[in-house]
Image: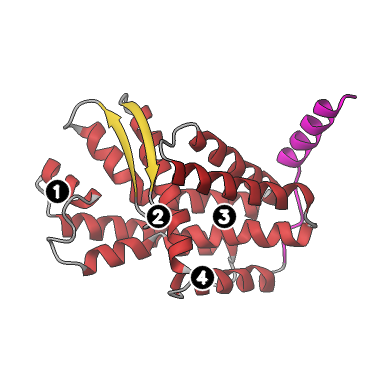
Amino acid sequence: MTAPQEVAARLWDEATSRQPVPEASFVLLTGAAALALVWLPVTWPRVRLGVTVVHEAGHAVVAVLVGRRLQGIRLHSDTSGVTLSRGRPRGPGMVVMLAAGYLAPAVVGLGAALLLADGRSLALLWLVVALLAALLLLVRNVYGVVVLVLAGAGVGAVTWWADPALQSVLAYLVAWLLLLAAPRPLLELGARGARARRGSDPDQLARLTRVPALVWVLVLLVANLAGLVVGVATLAPDLLPR
């Protein structure tokens, strides 16, 4: 078997195999670590940048699904981002695409939780690498390319060379961070005044639907909190009362 064939065989084996599901104490410990990373001022900007990557990926995927022409993604050093696409400026497709950004981290986090509950931690990490590689083809600025390359290389290195314990830590941190971080940008956006929300996704949704931007913030926030509850019940089923 040649070297490329060996690599492909290993990738397929890891992507399709199951790993032991860790004990509840491990899951809760990684959740506590993720919560600290989300709420500590020193670490939140880095976490938020990761959330922005998923946010923009949500816009991009839905833009393609609703028939818009995707032009590219830009990631900025202030943790903001923008996804550019062409198509009808109004209509259900535009509304769904705009709403998808703030929903994407919770949706991806919930998907990650389902994979982990099924013992698919390595599959999750390889999916993260694949997502970052796919986004690399769409990013149109140097900063965005650097962010994706570093993130993909880091996750790929852990997935390929690290011991199973560290791989489990990273996989559970990915799921917890997405679930726990998803509501925070909406909380921050809701706390700002109407002027500060201009140009945001909820502001654009308000112009399209005539539903106030603050209502859109609340709707998206409730959806993210619901995703968090379901994600916690999936990752740590003994934590929530039944």
Which callout, 2 or 1, points at the residue further toward the start of the chain?
2
In-image side of 31 versus 73 (left or right)? right
Q: Nearer the viewer, mark 2 or mark 4?
A: 2
Name the amino acid type tagged 3.
Ala
Q: Which residues are magenta?
A: 1-22
Which callout, 4 or 3, points at the residue further toward the start of the chain?
4
In-image side of 62 versus 113 (left or right)? left
Name the amino acid type tagged 4.
Leu
Mark 3, residue position: 113
Compare residues 35 and 71 and report the one nearer the observer: 71
Q: Which disc, if any, is residue 37?
A: 4
Distance, label 4 to label 3, CA atoms, is 18 Å
Q: Are marks 3 and 2 in contact (CB under 8 Å)?
A: no
Label 2: how many Cα within 10 Å (few below 14, some 14–19, many 20+):
few
Distance, label 3 to label 2, CA atoms, is 29 Å
Name the amino acid type tagged 2.
Ser
Q: Nearer the viewer, mark 2 or mark 1?
A: 2
Residue 13 is drawn in which quadrant? top right
Q: Nearer the viewer, mark 4 or mark 3?
A: 4
Q: Which disc, if any, is residue 206?
A: 1
Residue 44, given in percent of the width and then of the height, sits at 45, 67
Residue 5, given in percent of the width and then of the height, sits at 82, 26
Name the amino acid type tagged 1.
Ala
Count of numbered tags: 4
In-image side of 142 versus 2 (left or right)? left
Residue 117, given in percent of the width and then of the height, sits at 64, 55
